[in-house]
Amino acid sequence: MVFILMLVLALAAGTLSEEDASVRQATPLPPAPRCDPTYMYRTFDGTCNNLNFPRFGQAGTIFQRLMGPATYANDLSAIRLAKSGNRLPSTRLISTKVTVNSSFFDYDASLITMQWGQFMDHDLTQTPQFPITGGCCDGGLFGNVKANPNADCLHIPIPSGDPVYSNVNCMNMIRSTYGPRLDGTMPPRRQQINALTHWIDGSQIYGNNNSTAQSLRDRSSGKGLLAFSVQNGKVLLPTSPSTCADCFVAGDNRVREQPLLTVMHTLWLREHNRVAKALYAKFGPSRSDEFYYQEARRIVIAEIQHITYREYLPVILGPEVPLIPFDTQFNPAIFNEFATAAYRMGHSQLRSFIKLFEADGTGSDQSFFLGNSFLTGSFRLLNPKFIDNALRGQLLVPAHSVDECFAPDITSQLFRTTTALGADLVAINMQRGRDHGLPPYVRARQIALENSGLKPYPPPPPPMTFDDLAPTHSLEVIKSLKAVYKSVEDIDLYIGGVTERPLPGAAVGPTFAYIIAQQFDNLRRTDRFFYANLGQTVSFTPRQFDEIRKVSLARIICDNNDGTITQIQPMAFRRPSRYNMPIPCAKIPEVNFNYY
């Protein structure tokens, strides 16, 4: 969006004050796109999904809020204060006092549950920050606070005596960009921008603009394939030219964040090309490359949606989530509370040591520590055994429980290098929540419990005390929260939500369960192309829909591994058990493409 780019550049250059930018005013936007109601496929930038409101869900538009207006100290953009009127405690201090490095595992959920959550997050949310040269600390990521920091710096104060970061008082963080409503007017409070589309549309595979999408295609065969590389005899993601053998690229630029994410991207590259080839085998050269590409993309997106709603969400939220009819009147924009707090619960599911397994079931010498592989571990995929060994590891070992226990790899080693300290992701999550004006935890908890009717958690009448947290939090967590917050009403949404006891049969507690459920309800009810939305021009036929319902993550792994995974538990998000015993891949249902 042209206006957003101009706004960002103006703020970075200091020619437009924060107050000027936040005044509600009409701002011209480019003309709304013209939509063809008969066109069968999604646009890459998310427009024209809703024919009545073509900009709904467009990449580069603002988040919406689930739990009321943004919470800022001046009702504009200033970070909220404690109930006492003083500054809130340092999020780094909170992280060190409330989180622990002990390991408690969810012995039902497999580690691939964590990985699917990250993969889906990269389809739904990415918030850009203001482009500030040099950061906010005099040493870059860490150091001392600069004498005259940029107005959009929001550094994390590091308290004296910190167990990891000695002799510095500043952890770098820059505020998120914000923008106008869809009508071009500025909201009275900051509303942050989602760089991605607000749909489950496989944008992490295909890109969220036409230029990226076209750059990721291989038109040489006429079969609608995605571009790929072949290394050591294995089909891998394409690589960025003139860089390195493991500089893999995909629709989302975070593809190399850590090796398990790169493996998941590789599976779905292979799945797209497998589907495209199956369609080509049916129709041959009588159809165009564009036809095969778009049909395969359409099917792959449907597969991702089905796996998310029928396999992944029941592990996170508990009982299976019902489908809701399509509704053109709802805004599909991602909830800020979801993007900036609730869906970051997956950070607690991360394990420090990633154990891999060979085909014979023995531990692999390719196992690795996560902290040593952020942004630098994709070279591991060049080993021809790595992908299958990594998949076996994710299927067999449990995910970490969602609780106050976090791997040190993300509380002090995030993106660590041989010459630089790593960051604290828990502290960053809380600081980002303050930047985005998220409500404090107790307000969000009250809304969630009142609106969901979740038992056995009746909402206590406000004002709350720390003791009122007993139904949802352990005594140890309550004690830790008391030690850093002066009032229960000061607790940040992220730390309050992630430390809740999980609901029965779920991975998360009531507040995060409510936010996540509301988000995924909204994602499907607003999506004209949603795979289960039948009876529209763009819909699958009932028979095609029945075929999509056969897909599972287990089937995707069976079809796209490197040949050494020949049996698997049918419910891949749950670890093998007497109720989920591994069976031959030949017995896992598969989609019949003869109906397409």
Image (cartoon, helix red, strand yellow):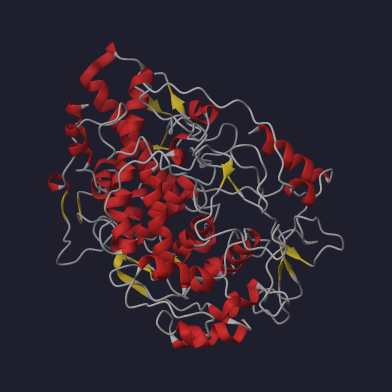
The reply, left or right, for residue 427 in relation to residue 350 is right
Residue 419, percent from left and from top: 68, 61
The quarter of the image holding the C terminus is top left
Q: Residue furthest left?
A: 587
Residue 167, percent from left and from top: 76, 75
Vertical placement of 306 versus 77: above or below? above
Vertical placement of 99 versus 252: above or below? below
The reply, left or right, for residue 432 in relation to residue 406 is right
Residue 364, percent from left and from top: 35, 60
Residue at horizontal 60 percent and vertical 32 percent from the top: 242
The reply, left or right, for residue 134 in relation to residue 222 is right
Vertical placement of 441 versus 60: above or below? below
Q: Is residue 19 visible?
A: yes
Q: Residue furthest top?
A: 286
Residue placed most toward the observer, 359 or 476: 476
The quarter of the image holding the N terminus is top right
Residue 169, percent from left and from top: 75, 72
User: Hey, which quadrant is residue 36 in on the image?
Assistant: top left
Number of callouts: 0
Residue at horizontal 30 percent and vertical 62 percent from the top: 315
Residue placed most toward the observer, 446 or 378: 446
Residue placed most toward the observer, 332 or 354: 332
Q: Is residue 383 visible?
A: no
The reply, left or right, for residue 410 in relation to residue 42 is right
Residue at horizontal 28 percent and vertical 46 percent from the top: 557
